[in-house]
Amino acid sequence: DAKTTQPTSMDCAEGRAANLPCNHSTISGNEYVYWYRQIHSQGPQYIIHGLKNNETNEMASLIITEDRKSSTLILPHATLRDTAVYYCIVSPEGVYNQGGKLIFGQGTELSVKP
Amino acid sequence: SQTIHQWPATLVQPVGSPLSLECTVEGTSNPNLYWYRQAAGRGLQLLFYSVGIGQISSEVPQNLSASRPQDRQFILSSKKLLLSDSGFYLCAWGRGVGHEQYFGPGTRLTVT
């Protein structure tokens, strides 16, 4: 069952902000939003996660709407090395999800162009 | 720091042959361990996960099996490979609380 909806592909100019949307209208109160990315022929890489509040780290910012039904991952200054498939995942944490399982969807293929 | 190893990096096997892929983690104890498969042009599919030695949960019924003989060792096996087993196999580890998972370099398996 698809819990998230993402655009299949997006383009972004190098140096500009990349804004990747994700819809998760059926998210439950105990579910977090996680973002991963996968560069071609490599394993996925954890980016960021959040529950209600906006989050920022050295890689990206995560903006979650007040109703938590959608979120946006922001790469503030995209580079060519940010070209990858970006996965938005919702998953409960702790006792609600023994084993910490992640269910990956199809993701968004982001192409950063010079 | 923690590192995760997978081998081999690439593998070509005939249909009906056995399979053994190994994954080991260094620098952490009692990790959760995961096996994923990615078919060409497709998303990642969770195959197995383990929360401790000898504890294996299967997500998708198929001709693959997994074992965890040691705390930081996770093995993916098959007695007889099918053409549909071709794909990119990824091992990952996590701390169990939360879903930050760290992936290995993967094994690209081609069944001929």
Image (spheres, coloured by chain):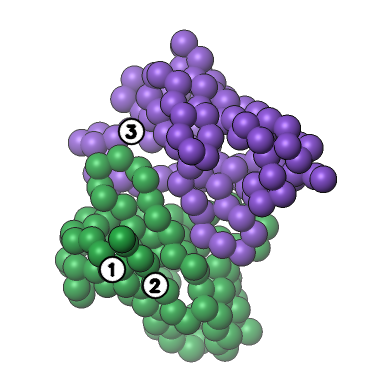
Chain colours: A purple, B green
> Of label 2 and label 1, which has the lower sequence position?
2
Q: Are marks 2 and 3 on the same chain?
A: no
Q: Nearer the viewer, residue B26 or B35?
A: B26
Please tell me in which quadrant of the rendered image residue B80 appears.
bottom left
Q: CA distance from mark 2 to mark 3?
A: 28 Å
Write down the residue under mark 2. B5
SS category of the residue bearing label 3: strand
Residue type, numbered disc 2: His
Q: Mark 2 falls within which chain?
A: B
- Residue B36's x, y, as percent? 45, 60
Q: Nearer the viewer, mark 2 or mark 3?
A: 2
Q: Are marks 2 and 1 on the same chain?
A: yes
Please tell me in which quadrant of the rendered image residue A97 appears.
top left
Q: CA distance from mark 1 to mark 3?
A: 27 Å
Q: Is residue B13 above or below residue B28?
A: below
B23 horizontally vs B54: left or right = right
Write down the residue under mark 1. B26
- Residue B37's x, y, as percent? 50, 62
Residue type, numbered disc 1: Glu
**Circle 3 Cα neighbour tier, 10 Å, few/some/many (<14 / 14–19 / ≥20):** many
Q: Nearer the viewer, residue A107 or B65?
A: A107
Residues under numbered marks 2 and 1 in contact, where contact means CB atoms less than 8 Å apart: yes
Residue type, numbered disc 3: Pro
Task: Residue lying at the far right in this picture: please name it.
Answer: A114
Q: Mark 1 falls within which chain?
A: B
Write down the residue under mark 3. A92
Q: Mark 3 falls within which chain?
A: A
Q: Which mark is residue A102?
A: none
